[in-house]
Amino acid sequence: MIVVRRNKSTPFITKDGSEIRAILDRTNAPVRNQSLAEATLPPGGATEGHRHPSTEEFYYVLSGRGSITVEDETQELATSEGVLIPPGSYHRLVNTGRGPLVFLCCCSPPYSDDDTVMQR
């Protein structure tokens, strides 16, 4: 059994500009098919628009408010809401709230900078 404590994970900045804490991924467990991370965007912060050609993602909002664009559709997101980002889909997330936007990000296959294509 592998148990990872969130607070023992050192945060880092991903290629899209969000702060990530790996919960379970290739860096801390024998993960093969997915990854789970906690991401944080400060008030007014945003990820840079990008695509993952091979990766399907789920975002699940733990706290805060945001606006998500997937391809040509934009919707508001709030606590306890999730969104599917299909492989190859352009996406960008903006924190529209007054506090941090904290969300879980599940990727399959596991997140990789090599599968991140930046776009404006």
Image (cartoon, grey):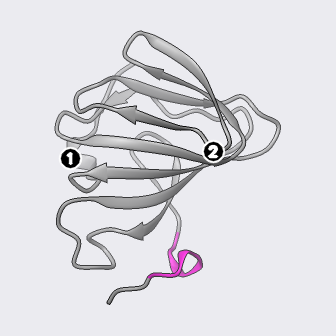
Pick whichever, 22 or 11, lies toward us: 22
Label 1: how many residues lie within 10 Å, few (<14), some (14-19) or many (20+)?
Answer: few
Q: Nearer the viewer, residue 74 or 28?
A: 74
The percent coordinates of residue 69 (x first, y second) are: 48, 20
Secondary element under disc 2, as helix, strand or loop, is loop
Q: In this picture, which residue range is highlighted in magenta?
A: 4-10
Q: Which residue is mark 2?
A: 80
Left or right for 28, reference 11: left
Give the residue at the far top of this rendering. Answer: 72
Q: Give the residue type at disc 2.
A: Ser
Residue in front for this viewpoint, 116 or 77:
77
How crowded pointer 2 is (Cα within 10 Å; few <14, some 14-19, many 20+) is rated as: few
Query: Could you tell me which residue is drawn at 20 percent across and 47 percent down?
Result: 114
Q: Circle 1 is placed at which residue position?
A: 114
Q: Who's the residue at 21% across and 43% down the image?
A: 115
The spot of residue 95 in percent (x, y) is: 67, 33
Residue 52 in the figure: left or right of residue 96: left
